[in-house]
Amino acid sequence: MFTVGMRECEEKKVTLHGLTSVGVGAVVHYMYTGELQLSAASLQSVLEAANALLINDVLDMCLDYLLETMSVDSCLTRLHQADCYSLDRLEAAADDFILAHITQVAKLPQFQDLVCDKLCEYLDSDQLGVSNELEAFRVALSWLNHDFTARRQFAGRVMSHIRFPLLSIEELVRHVRTVDFMRRDEECRALVMEATRYQKCPTQQILLQTRRTQVRSANKVLVVVGGSTVEGQADESREVKHV
């Protein structure tokens, strides 16, 4: 602003719009002393000032603070801050944290404000931190039901990322088919039919593979079944090898 030929470099007085005295004061103090004190109360002001004045060292320290204080309560705020200030590393860290703690994060009021694209990105991930697909279904359902009148148009798209074929017939009947739009919406109904067919025809499952039939896992596994022992005898192995 002051060194690259912009208007401000020739003015005797510059008004910094949208910045607070706390934020600018902290940045100026750092420039003279090399010291920066951050707290939850001052962070936003300092971040805004450092971003506006292009003080990269201060931005880096703010970023470190944001990463170190990531929590269930703050992760969605961190995601918003990453978007506002183009902090790619913070966005990646927030995404990873949200995925790992999705069932807790989904209970926060701010979760309901996620845009559909972001929600679908999470629901599609193999790293989604759910113990079963019923939990993933409930996360999707809570987001849709928050404002169903406006969001019903997204029902098929959102639910297409739930791996219904991994649910048992009993779970499909008790928890999925009882949801009205899962029966009435054409796309959602097709997803339930796909899952039902997959569960009812175990011998055909190898021919019915899609992304929705793949178990979510952050680890790749190699399953070895059968073979021979070192003594040459047949062996029925049930070990799972992580690679």
Image (cartoon, rainbow, N blue to C red):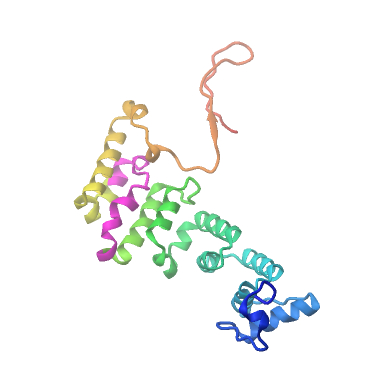
- The answer to whether residue 155 is magenta is yes
Residue nearer the viewer, 128 or 45:
45
Where is residue 106 shown, x and y percent of the image?
Answer: 43, 62
- The answer to whether residue 236 is magenta is no
Number of marks in the image? 0
- Please, which residue is most extreme toward the right here? 33
**Image quarter in which the N terminus is found:** bottom right
Res 138 → quadrant: bottom left
Res 170 → quadrant: top left
Please report the residue visible at 25 percent of the width from the left and 65 percent of the height from the top.
149
What range of the chain is rendered magenta?
A: 149-172
Where is residue 13 shown, x and y percent of the image?
Answer: 65, 89
Please report the residue visible at 64 percent of the width from the left and 14 percent of the height from the top.
230
Residue nearer the viewer, 40 or 182:
40
Magenta part, dominant SS: helix
Q: Is residue 70 left or right of residue 118?
A: right
Where is residue 4 shown, x and y percent of the image?
Answer: 67, 71
Please report the residue visible at 54 percent of the width from the left and 30 percent of the height from the top.
222
Residue nearer the viewer, 130 or 153:
153
Where is residue 67 shown, x and y percent of the image?
Answer: 63, 63
Q: Is residue 101 left or right of residue 138?
A: right
Q: Is residue 112 left or right of residue 59?
A: left
Res 212 → quadrant: top left
**Image quarter in which the C terminus is found:** top right
- Note whether 185 is above or below 149 in the view shown: above
- Please, which residue is most extreme toward the left here? 184
